[in-house]
Amino acid sequence: MLPLAGCPTPHGGSPAVVATQTRENQIAITAAQALALLEEGNDRFVSGQMIHRDLQRQVKETSGGQYPFAAVVTCLDSRITPEFMFDQGLGDIFSARVAGNIINEDILGSLEFATKVSGAKLIAVIGHTNCGAIKGACDDVQLGHLTSLLARIQPAVNAVQTAPGEARSSKNHAFVEKVAEMHVRLTLKAIREQDPILNDLIERGQIGLIGDIYDLETGKVTFLKD
């Protein structure tokens, strides 16, 4: 695997000079390797061993172009900054942020740009624990434009089964977390069903698609399995 941004030296030595993403590295990387970079970065974040980067140098190095290896869709929540949770630098990942990590035509278009046009090899959709947007959807909150945004989460609310008499509201923590995971899974399904361009890239193995849940208490990202 080529040395990419965020890769430490082997055998626990001092961090190597962190390389800014280049076109050559982006072309060479696979979807599986892109996922591994996110996993390794999250491990560093959780363990408190994030790599020191010369961000001013990366500003200059990325001024003429960008070659991110992944595109990440996350919630607007201020506590889940993708570059931090995956320990990445400038030019490493595309980041699409919107309350409830929903998708719409604008997000899908952004992901088409990130992958088909700009060469990213992985799409990661990340929900998180104790999500305010998920709670709002569970409680059927009505408020201006937020109403239509939360409606995009409602299918996940409806899809989660509960026992008779069990609360289906934000007061039921377990229900909220199940809805958050279901929402990510349904979003992955919707990306493939609603966007022929992205689905074709996935079918051809040119990009990967993964769902994740970020734990606000630990900083750990759990990658969802089928």
Image (cartoon, grey):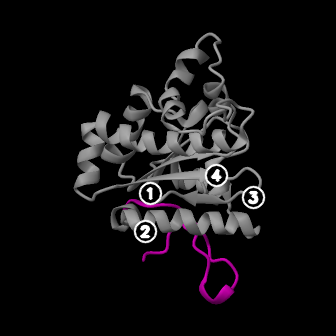
Q: Secondary structure at mark 4?
A: strand
Q: Secondary structure at mark 3?
A: loop
Q: Residue at x 45, y 63 (%)?
A: 34
Name the disc covering residue 126, or none.
none
| Measured Cα–Cα span from mark 1 to mark 4 | 20 Å
Q: Residue at x 74, y 70 (%)?
A: 49
Of callouts 2 and 1, which one flags the residue occurring earlier in the amino acid sequence? 2
Residue position marked by numbered label 2 in the rendering: 33
**Residues in magenta?**
1-23
Residue position marked by numbered label 1 in the rendering: 69
| Measured Cα–Cα span from mark 3 to mark 4 | 8 Å
Q: Amino acid at mark 2?
A: Gln
Quadrant housing the C terminus: bottom left
Residue 79, percent from left and from top:
73, 44
Q: Main secondary structure of the magenta part?
A: loop
Residue 41, percent from left and from top:
61, 65
| Measured Cα–Cα span from mark 2 to mark 4 | 20 Å
| Viewer-nearest of discs 2 and 4 | 4
| Measured Cα–Cα span from mark 2 to mark 1 | 9 Å
Q: Secondary structure at mark 2?
A: helix
Name the disc covering residue 214, or none.
4
